[in-house]
Amino acid sequence: MDLSTALRAFVRIVERGSMTAAATDLGISQPAVSKLLRNLEEHTGARLIERNPRAMRPTAQGLALYEAAGSALAVIDSAIESVRSDVGAIRGNLRLHGPTCIGERHLHQIVAEFQDRYAAVTVELILENRTVDLIHENVDLALRMGRPVDQNLIMRRIGLSRRILVASPEYLERCGPVRVCEDLSGHDMVVTNASLSGGVLPLHKGNQKIEISVRPRLITNNAQVLVGALRTGKGIGTAQVLLVADELKNGSLIRVLPEYEIEPTEFFLVYPSSKFLRPTVRAFVDFAAPALQRVEGIY
C-alpha cells in the first residue's frame, strides 16, 4: 500500500464528506478511493470513517489521524513547493474562494492576469455568497466581505467598497426625481439582502446618518440580477460602485442623492494560520491585493 496516497485520500474524504467528491478532487475513481480507505483501516487496525446513507464522518480515531496527517501532508507539500520556488517556479494548484459580485466582475480577470505571469498555476475559482471553512473545505485563500472574526485566520485588508444609490434615467423620468431622502419612501427599490435592516435603509452623509423606510420591489443577493433590474428601470437600487462603474460612465445608470452613501463594505484576503503559506499562495496574495485596490470603488 502507498501510505502517502492512502492518507491523502482519507484526508479528502474527511474534508469533503463523500467518497465521490474525494475521488473527483483526486482525479481517481470512487472504487479506488474506497479501496485506499479500506487498506488504510486495515493498516491502522481501526475504523476511521463512520458510514451512513446521508454522510461520512470520522470516528474519534479517524479525527485524530486526520488532524495529524492533514498537517503533515500540508508541510510536505509546502516544502516541495518551496524547493520548486527556490529555483524560480511558482506552480501547482490554488483553490480560491470569493463572493459572486466581485468575482464575476473583477476577481476572475485578476486570476487570468496572474496565470499569464505564472503559467504553471492551476486555479480553482469558487464564487458563491457564503462563508467557507477554509481548513475543512481545503481552500487556500478567500476574498471576504466584512471583517472575519475567526482568530485562526490571517488577514490582509484590501479596503472599503463604496455603496451608492443608482437608477436608470428612464425610471426617474417615469416615476419622478428624488430630491430629498424622504422621497425614497415613494419609490420602488431594488436592493441587496445586506442593504436593509427591517425595511429601513440607512444612509450616510459625512457624520450624519438617516434611516428611511422603503418598499423593496426586488431583494436579491445576485449582482447580475441587481444591475440588470436597475438598468431596465425596475426601481432605485443600492449598489457597490465596483459593480456599476461602467454603467455610470455610459449613462445607463445615474446616481440618486449623490451626497449620500450607504455604509461601505470591507474586503479582506484571508488564509488559515494553521497552514504553511505555500509560495504560490503568497505570490497570489502579493499580486491580487494591489490589483483589487485599483478596482474603481475600492478605497
Image (tube, rainbow, N blue to C red):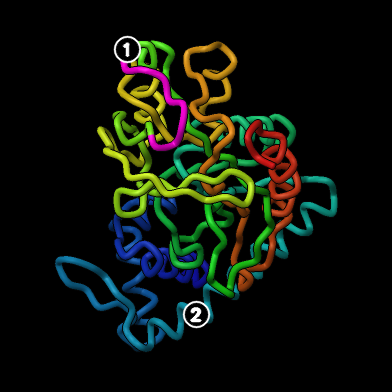
Q: Quick check: can you spot residue 235?
A: yes
Query: Which region of the structure is painted magenta?
Result: 175-182
Residue 95 visible in the picture: no
Give the foreground label among 1 and 2. Answer: 1
Instruction: Look at label 1 and name its amino acid.
Output: Arg
The residue at the point 55 percent across, 37 percent down is 260
Q: Which residue is mark 2?
A: 67
User: Does the magenta run of residues contain 181?
Assistant: yes
As rendered, which of 236 and 143 lies closer to the eye? Answer: 236
In the picture shown, does residue 256 fall above or below 45?
A: above
Point out the residue furthest to the left here: 53
* Residue 91 screen position, x and y as percent: 68, 45
Q: Earlier in the sequence, mark 1 or mark 2?
A: 2
Q: Quadrant of the N terminus?
A: bottom left
> Looking at this view, is 35 or 175 the one in front?
175
Residue at image point 65% right, 39% down: 298
Give the number of callouts: 2
